[in-house]
Amino acid sequence: MGRWEPGARERLQGAALSLYSGKGFEVTTVAEIAQVAGLTERTFYRYFADKREVLFAIYDEFTRPFLDGIEGAPQGARPMEIMAAAVATASEFFTVDRQPYSRTRQSVIMANPELHERELLKLASLAATLATALRERGVKQTAATLAAEMGVTVYRVSFELWIADGETRPMAEIASGVFAELGVLTGPA
Amino acid sequence: MGRWEPGARERLQGAALSLYSGKGFEVTTVAEIAQVAGLTERTFYRYFADKREVLFAIYDEFTRPFLDGIEGAPQGARPMEIMAAAVATASEFFTVDRQPYSRTRQSVIMANPELHERELLKLASLAATLATALRERGVKQTAATLAAEMGVTVYRVSFELWIADGETRPMAEIASGVFAELGVLTGPA
């Protein structure tokens, strides 16, 4: 088997999720994942450090759209407007064909405290990265931290609404509604 | 050694933190913690499931003040006002004599990804508990989740400011300022 396998990464991610969802995360081995994907264990380890990381490689892809949104927001935009732009850009990642994968991934993660912890660490790391990007745009430290944390919270709440049964609105529309709700909650009485 | 040791819990927490901070979390054993505290390993396990949990037992104590704040907020208070009351009540837990312990605990936790993950899981669980308490007061689900998450974020940002070198303001005062900053951030331009 050569060093380059077309679509190997995605095949491994799909195989891992099927096994975690079917027989369970704890009892699934890397050998089984590789077998289901029609690849070798060696190929698995070329893409992922371990069987936990295969579920979190997604953060490597979708941190970039958040940052693009921050960098692309107009000069003079306020911190929460910048975060709304970041979440809107990142929402494009969640196309309707990703919904089944996203639903299954979420249920696997929530069923396992070790995976849930790792997810929270990745989200905290995402918030820290976005806070740094806001500071680079001149936002002061506490404001940058608060805005980044709120942006990630809005993203997370929106994501949970998006994967709910029967939900058909695009992620960007849901997120826009959640930002509006946040404004009402924290606004004057 | 009898079943009851006065202050055993606090002595074990203090001994564990000293060892984690001095020689490191990974290499410290439960036997060493018990020895430094002048207690037996058996006594340790009467209080804590493992050497990680000894750092997180604090959540059992301080979830209650948050809930007291929610339950004690006046009828008709808006969700963010209820959360401000919750954080104010919880702030009383962080008296000035706790500052050194809190600083050391934070540096131990941030130095170890496994501990950082556990801390994030505890904070997520705290936010979920507070969201449930808000819903019991009639706040709708998404608003309850957002308000609880923002309250915990304000608490966390305030805590980090409170333990900073040279900070002398009480936690409640810091938290009140962070809530005000949140209002400005999310308010109209």
Image (cartoon, coloured by chain):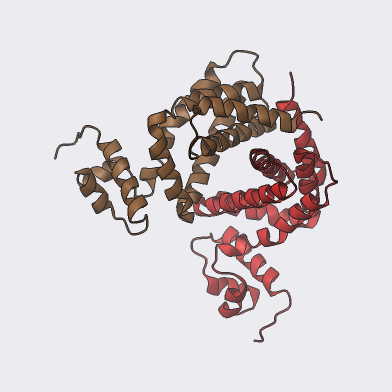
Chain colours: A red, B brown
Residue at the extreme right: A74
Q: Residue at x 51, y 69 (%)?
A: A29
Q: How many dots with numbers?
A: 0
- Image spot of residue B181 (x, y percent): 67, 30
Q: Nearer the viewer, residue A100 or B129?
A: B129
- Is residue B49 in view? no
Residue B85: name its quadrant.
Answer: top right
Residue at the image position 55 percent from the left and 72 percent from the top: A32
On the picture, is A114 further left or further right than A139?
left
- Vertical arrangement, residue B17 with respect to residue B170, above or below: below
The quarter of the image holding the C terminus of chain A is top right
Extreme front residue here? B166
Q: Quadrant of residue A178?
A: top right
Whether residue B70 is visible to the viewer of this picture, yes or no, is yes
Task: Answer left or right for A1 relative to A66.
Answer: left
User: Which quadrant would the N terminus of chain A be assigned to in this image?
Assistant: bottom right
From this viewpoint, which residue is outermost toward the top?
B75
What's the residue at 48%, 40% (across, down)?
B165
Q: Residue at x 58, y 71 (%)?
A: A33
Q: Could you say where residue A94 lies in the image, as x and y percent from the top left?
A: 77, 53
Relative horizontal placement of residue A115, taking residue A73 as reference (left or right) = left
Q: At which x and y percent is residue A127?
A: 65, 48
**Considering only vertical position in the picture, is B174 above or below A163?**
above
- Residue A115, image x, y percentages: 54, 54
Residue furthest to the bottom in view is A1
